[in-house]
Image (cartoon, rainbow, N blue to C red):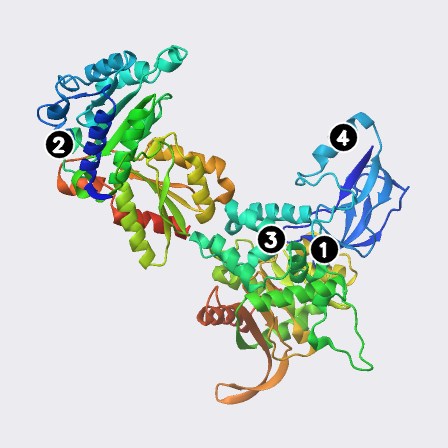
């Protein structure tokens, strides 16, 4: 019997993915856990392992198509005792809401639909998932019904400011939200308008007045990665009131120590320990001491994260990716150096796993490598802060009564002003500054 | 149309029915020569004589038991329990005999009877003259219970109760007797048992109440309105059979429900309404169906500050409504 293979839910914030290359074709024999298809989601490409062993029967979703989690993407004829197959598939598929029976059966068009992607059952299944996922998104029966009736996705609901107790979304909140986004169309129309990724490029929603073309202009289509970056950046700037603080750090002793010993370290530790490793070390301590910076703002309160997982922005062709160093506060400088090297290598090779890019609680971006001396980074939503490290520049600096040539850099903190204020931001930056400026390790150790 | 006190409306209803139907007999403690401790039956003894207006011993089981015997023998008894607090000796008669007779006899016997029960607190009556008893009796299949809150309903529901072929417990709130006046339609005005009524329309929450609490709730709604919260006030009037349709329609409009009764909250009648709303109106709800009742103490206290603490008032109701709306 044919068993459906569904688009997996890759992480709690990932609701859809674009299929990359199919690694197996119809008729191919597939072993359980053998890579089946590439899925491009949320800044990362993953290879989806086959949940079953058998023969790939039909590919339902073609390469390049974007579908929501839970959508059937292929069918497979399972090998082994057919009698057990049903039971197996029932247990193997993690409770995917009531949407079992639609491989590609055309929907009896509920209303004039302009958005062929994202069938409605999948959307309501998502709403359920989000309800379980986030406490503040616990919805009253009425709000849940309204959300379903108006095709509101979990992302839409997250955007609604709740005025009820503990930030709960009330009926009035939903109605205000619906009114504010305009009375246009039925559920499918509104869904398309608010989820550009779901609408095919070139539809009315994507063509604003600003995009009138003159001769010689060229439209570069958005890659999946570009689209994700665009959505995330816009969302961060839209929802988070950004504020900034910048501090000057004299890293002369650190730079000198590193220049003197980096060759030794490379031999002894097997890694080129970059300046970033030292900064990550200092940042993780500062985050430990000032936990409110390691947080996310939620309507229920500032959610201070216990784990210190520091994301590092890495430039890749056509974009940017943020692999995460897990438990950074528990690692030595040498250990951080190794993590940084491994993650950057995997990022540039396009081999990051989903685990590599998830769980970040704070982000460091390093525009300094491109020569920036003063940066205003955009927060990596939903985190509360991002640190930019600018280029180290040799500068004349007043030291005591004299002027000296010193190695100086700017550290800039972009922070969510809802979560904390400038005083905390500067306390945090000064914490890092004092660690870096008083850098005095023993012997040739990189540890401080 | 005449402006009447709640008490006079009951008296007039009783008088008119006794004129209309010679089978009606009033019996109870001091209902005859004295005209009742509250004066509800004043003048009936003089008008209809001692065969139809009977003073009884202080024995509630006897009052209801005798009424039961009258009803199966063709009379239409209207026994009065002087205070609701003293109805409990008659509980066995009501539960085991009165309410069950039709069922037990497979329709061979019926028991038309209107048990008038002055009830409720806020009258400085202390533990033996203030209690609410509706929850005990609402649990009994075969009984109907009405609790009019206005003079018009007091008269109209009394007539409906007397004309009903089955036993009805008629709850008349003592504090309303002389404190509430209202228009009572002239003539043979009957208010059917069953339908609840929306006393004040609103959009933000529905408050369900009956008896004295109806008036406190209306006052609370007035306060809330000045704050921008429009409460819909539904007067249940009949406790059993419960008008689920009107209740659910109101919750569908407002999406929030507050149930108010002066009886203590635990296992009070409000629990039945809340449960019904939760079961049948779940998809309408934007806040949990909420009950506001008296505190769980063994009686309405005597001392004024304690009685005030026990009794619900407009202020307490408004406060509860605010938190339901804010949910």
In the image, which disc is placed on residue A86?
A: 4
Q: Nearer the viewer, mark 1 or mark 2?
A: 2
Q: Which of marks 4 and 2 is in front?
A: 2
Q: Which residue is drawn at 67% across and 73% down?
A: A260
Q: Nearer the viewer, mark 2 or mark 3?
A: 2
Q: Which residue is drawn at 32% across and 54% down?
A: B224
Q: In this rendering, is residue B306 above or below A366?
A: above
In the rendering, at what x and y percent does residue B142 appear?
37, 21
Q: Dot 3 corresponds to which residue?
A: A150
Q: Mark 1 lies on which chain?
A: A
Crowd rating for badge 4 (residues with CA inside 10 Å; few <14, some 14–19, many 20+): some
Q: Dot 1 corresponds to which residue?
A: A113
Discs 1, 2 touching: Cβ within 8 Å:
no
In the rendering, at what x and y percent does residue B115 appear?
25, 24
Of residue B14 and residue B205, the one placed in the foreground of this image is: B14
Q: Is mark 1 on a helix, strand or loop?
A: loop
Q: In this rendering, is residue B6 above or below A393?
A: above
């Amino acid at each position: 019997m044919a068993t459906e293979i569904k688009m997996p839910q890759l992480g709690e914030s990932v609701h859809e993915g674009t299929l990359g290359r199919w690694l197996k074709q119809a008729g191919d024999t597939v072993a359980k856990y053998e890579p089946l298809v590439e899925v491009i989601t949320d800044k990362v490409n993953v290879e989806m392992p086959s949940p079953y062993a058998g023969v790939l029967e039909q590919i339902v979703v073609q390469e390049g198509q974007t579908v929501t989690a839970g959508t059937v993407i292929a069918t497979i004829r399972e090998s082994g005792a057919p009698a057990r197959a049903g039971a197996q598939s029932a247990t193997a598929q993690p409770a995917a809401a009531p949407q079992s029976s639609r491989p590609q059966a055309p929907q009896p068009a509920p209303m004039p639909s302009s958005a062929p992607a994202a069938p409605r059952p999948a959307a309501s299944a998502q709403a359920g998932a989000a309800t379980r996922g986030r406490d503040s998104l616990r919805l009253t029966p009425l709000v849940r019904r309204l959300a379903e009736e108006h095709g509101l996705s979990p992302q839409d609901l997250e955007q609604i400011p709740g005025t009820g107790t503990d930030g709960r979304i009330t009926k009035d909140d939903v109605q205000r939200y619906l009114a504010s986004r305009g009375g246009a169309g039925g559920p499918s129309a509104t869904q398309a308008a608010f989820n550009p990724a779901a609408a095919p490029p070139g539809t009315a929603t994507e063509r604003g007045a600003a995009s009138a073309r003159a001769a010689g202009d060229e439209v570069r289509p958005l890659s999946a990665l570009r689209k994700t970056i665009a959505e995330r950046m816009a969302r961060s700037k839209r929802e988070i009131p950004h504020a900034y603080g910048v501090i000057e750090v004299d890293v002369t002793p650190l730079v000198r120590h590193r220049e003197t010993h980096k060759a030794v370290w490379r031999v002894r530790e097997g890694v080129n320990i970059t300046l970033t490793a030292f900064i990550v070390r200092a940042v993780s301590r500062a985050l430990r001491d000032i936990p409110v910076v390691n947080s996310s703002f939620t309507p229920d309160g500032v959610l201070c994260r216990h784990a210190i997982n520091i994301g590092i922005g890495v430039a890749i062709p056509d974009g940017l990716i943020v692999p995460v160093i897990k438990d950074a506060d528990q690692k030595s400088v040498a250990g951080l150096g190794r993590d940084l090297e491994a993650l950057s290598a995997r990022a540039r090779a396009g081999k990051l796993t989903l685990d590599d890019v998830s769980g970040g609680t704070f982000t460091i971006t390093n525009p300094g490598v491109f020569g920036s001396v003063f940066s205003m980074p955009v927060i990596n939503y939903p985190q509360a802060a991002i640190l930019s490290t600018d280029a180290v520049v040799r500068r004349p600096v007043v030291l005591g009564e004299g002027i000296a040539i010193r190695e100086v850099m700017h550290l800039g903190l972009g922070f969510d002003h809802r979560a904390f204020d400038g005083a905390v931001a500067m306390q945090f930056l000064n914490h890092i500054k004092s660690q870096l400026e008083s850098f005095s390790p023993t012997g040739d150790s990189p540890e401080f | 149309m005449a402006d009447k006190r709640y008490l006079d409306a009951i008296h007039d209803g009783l008088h008119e029915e006794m004129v209309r139907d010679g089978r009606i007999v009033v019996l109870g403690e001091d209902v005859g020569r004295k005209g009742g401790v509250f004066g509800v039956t004043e003048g009936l003894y003089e008008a209809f004589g001692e065969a139809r207006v009977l003073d009884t011993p202080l024995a509630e089981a006897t009052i209801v038991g005798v009424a039961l015997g009258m009803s199966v023998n063709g009379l239409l008894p209207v026994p009065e329990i002087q205070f609701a607090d003293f109805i409990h000796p008659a509980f066995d008669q009501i539960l085991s005999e009165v309410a069950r007779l039709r069922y037990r006899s497979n329709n061979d016997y019926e028991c038309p009877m209107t048990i008038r029960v002055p009830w409720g607190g806020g009258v400085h009556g202390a533990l033996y003259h203030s209690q609410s008893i509706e929850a005990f009796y609402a649990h009994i299949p075969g009984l109907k219970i009405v609790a009019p809150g206005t003079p018009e309903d007091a008269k109209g529901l009394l007539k409906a109760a007397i004309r009903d072929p089955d036993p009805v417990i008629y709850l008349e709130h003592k504090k309303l007797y002389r404190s509430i006046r209202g228009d009572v339609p002239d003539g043979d005005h009957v208010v059917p048992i069953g339908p609840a009524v929306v006393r004040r329309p609103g959009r933000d929450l529905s408050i369900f109440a009956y008896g004295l609490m109806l008036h406190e709730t209306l006052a609370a709604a007035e306060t809330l309105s000045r704050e921008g919260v429009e409460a819909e006030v539904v007067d249940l009037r009949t406790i059993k059979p419960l008008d689920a349709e009107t209740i659910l329609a109101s919750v569908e409009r407002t999406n929030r429900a507050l149930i108010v009764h002066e009886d203590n909250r635990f296992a009070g009648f409000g629990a039945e309404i809340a449960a019904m709303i939760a079961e049948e109106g779940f998809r309408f709800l934007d806040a949990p169906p909420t009950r506001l009742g008296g505190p769980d103490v063994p009686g309405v206290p005597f001392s004024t500050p304690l009685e005030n603490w026990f009794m619900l008032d407009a202020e307490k109701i408004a406060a509860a409504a605010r938190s339901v709306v804010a949910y």
